[in-house]
Image: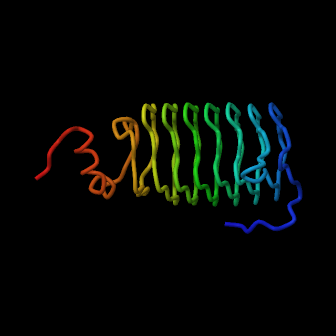
């Protein structure tokens, strides 16, 4: 993961960018704000955009959209992106503490070589999403609709919404690791 060079090339701390559109551009070494003073990207739209080596203590972009966008080497503390739409998005070599995608729609999204402490996909519609080379600490998908979601290789410490994993692909090792969790969810006693 790239280190964040200071000073940033652009500091958006406390900038109100609600409904802003970032079209066919590259954002490099941008500070998207501090935890107590995030940039407001509510309803924002990134299309054909590349985000490199940026930082966001809190990425505040509910009801926004990421379309044909690549995010690389970026550090996000809390991603507040619920009710958003992501299509053809690639995260690569990113570090994300918490990613709130509740009620979001994700299509053709890849998290490659990322570290995600917690991802919340509750009530999300998720199609063709994969996590190659990535790790996820907690995986929430309560009430989610999954289609061709590849979570092979992930070993989350916690999964909630096991019954919503229909449409996901897991590997043999995960099946063994999650067997107790699956049994509990189905009300099966294993002795």
Q: Position of residue 80 (x, y in %)?
A: 65, 42
Viewer-closest of 99 and 33: 33
Viewer-closest of 91 and 59: 59
Left or right relative to 43: residue 120: left
Q: Quadrant of residue 65?
A: top right
Q: Position of residue 5 (x, y in %)?
A: 81, 68
Q: Quadrant of residue 21?
A: top right
Where 63 falls versus 110 (above or below)?
Answer: above
Left or right relative to 156: residue 113: right
Left or right relative to 21: residue 188: left
Viewer-closest of 182 and 34: 34
Image point 83% across, 39% down: which residue?
Answer: 22
Which residue is outermost to the left?
191
Q: Quadrant of residue 68?
A: top right
Q: Position of residue 46 (x, y in %)?
A: 76, 39
Q: Position of residue 9 (x, y in %)?
A: 89, 59
Left or right relative to 156: residue 131: right
Image point 24% across, 44% down: which residue?
Answer: 184
Image point 40% across, 57% down: which residue?
Answer: 157
User: In what quadrant of the picture does the N terminus appear?
Assistant: bottom right
């Amino acid at each position: 993961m790239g280190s964040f060079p200071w000073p940033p090339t652009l500091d958006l701390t406390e900038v109100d960018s609600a409904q802003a559109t970032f079209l066919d551009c590259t954002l490099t070494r941008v500070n998207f704000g501090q935890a107590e003073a995030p940039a407001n990207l509510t309803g924002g739209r990134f299309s054909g955009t590349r985000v490199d080596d940026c930082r966001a203590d809190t990425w505040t972009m509910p009801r926004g959209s990421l379309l044909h966008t690549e995010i690389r080497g970026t550090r996000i503390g809390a991603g507040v992106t619920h009710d958003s739409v992501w299509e053809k998005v690639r995260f690569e070599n990113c570090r994300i503490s918490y990613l709130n995608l509740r009620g979001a729609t994700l299509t053709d999204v890849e998290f490659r070589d990322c570290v995600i402490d917690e991802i919340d996909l509750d009530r999300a519609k998720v199609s063709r999403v994969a996590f190659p080379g990535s790790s996820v600490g907690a995986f929430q998908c309560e009430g989610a609709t999954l289609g061709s979601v590849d979570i092979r290789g992930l070993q989350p410490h916690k999964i909630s919404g096991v019954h919503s994993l229909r449409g996901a692909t897991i590997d043999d090792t995960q099946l063994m690791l999650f067997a107790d969790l699956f049994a509990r969810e189905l009300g099966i006693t294993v002795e």
